[in-house]
Image: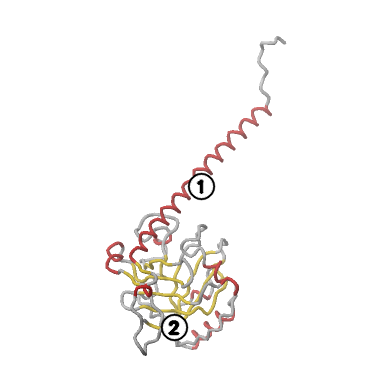
Amino acid sequence: MSRGKKKRKTAGDILRYIILIIAACVFVFSAVQLGRIFLEYRAGTQEYDRIREYVQEDPQEETEQPEEGEAEDRPVPPAVDWESLKAINSDIIAWLQIEGTEISYPVVKGTDNDYYLHHTFEKNYNSAGSIFVEYTNSSDFQDCNTIIYGHNMRNGSMFGLLRKYFQSQDSLPGRYVWICTPEKDYRYEIFSSHVVDASGEVYTLFSAPDEQFQQYLDSMKAQSLVDFGVDVTKEDKIITLSTCTGNDATRFVVQAKREGEY
């Protein structure tokens, strides 16, 4: 064989080339996907940061000192600019804030449970979606059980920190949830947090505060990962905050009963 003659490629060489090309394509595809996810996360975070400019989350700092005889420890809800928020999205029905956490978002209600899974408050398509109420619930939070959904985002946004904060006694940041509406501000006290089946009884809605509702409440409290020491009865109105766990078969929920109106 002459020195100038090229070496013939074997089947093994061709296979290695094919594998190399496939690996390069997978790398490029993965990089593009990661870039897309990063841009979506950033866009979602920036949007909700803008939205929070219409909410004063600690208005107590600028309020006058209570007069003699007034309670100094009276809870003060976030101050919400409803006119501005409704101008952006008329589907808004509340503002949700969990005391002691970064969880503070507008709450919307659509005509189904699909749209706001992948659309932000400004109705931009984004995997972060929105915090939204079960569409069969009433909009005034007067149902026995109002269900509120939010994504478990990897960057901690939306309900991404829900499980981190409420799955054990040691991680609890606080016990109260604000649901502020254009008409009234409600404060809820957490009584249960637990992992549930994606289609389990936790998502039951009730037409009246009857004994079936009391049995449900007893069951939810018994399943809690944390003993909050909070009694709950059929006369209470509750909210159920629900997010995914990474397992399609389960969800993580935090439940709270209405403590008062402010």
Residue matched to label 1? 34
Q: Amino acid at mark 2?
A: Glu
Task: Report the number of numbered marks.
Answer: 2
Depth order, front residue of 95/52: 52
Q: Amino acid at mark 1?
A: Leu
* Residue furthest bottom as drawn: 69
Q: Position of residue 232 (x, y in %)?
A: 50, 85
Residue at the (68%, 24%) spot, across then down: 10
Query: What secondary structure is marked by label 1?
Result: helix
- Look at the image and tell me in which quarter the N terminus lies: top right
Q: Position of residue 217 (x, y in %)?
A: 52, 82
The reply to whether discs 1 and 2 touch (Cβ–Cβ < 8 Å) is no
Query: Mark 1: few, some, or many residues within 10 Å (few <14, many ≥20)?
Result: few
Residue at the (40%, 62%) spot, across then down: 116
Which numbered disc, 1 or 2, marks the residue that appears first in the sequence? 1
Q: Position of residue 175 (x, y in %)?
A: 50, 77
Which label was assigned to residue 259?
2
Q: Position of residue 89 (x, y in %)?
A: 31, 63
The correct choice, above or below, for 33 with respect to 225 in the image is above
> CA separation, marks 1 and 2?
43 Å
Query: What secondary structure is marked by label 2?
Result: strand
Q: Is residue 124 left or right of residue 205?
A: left
Q: Nearer the viewer, mark 1 or mark 2?
A: 2
* Residue furthest top as drawn: 2
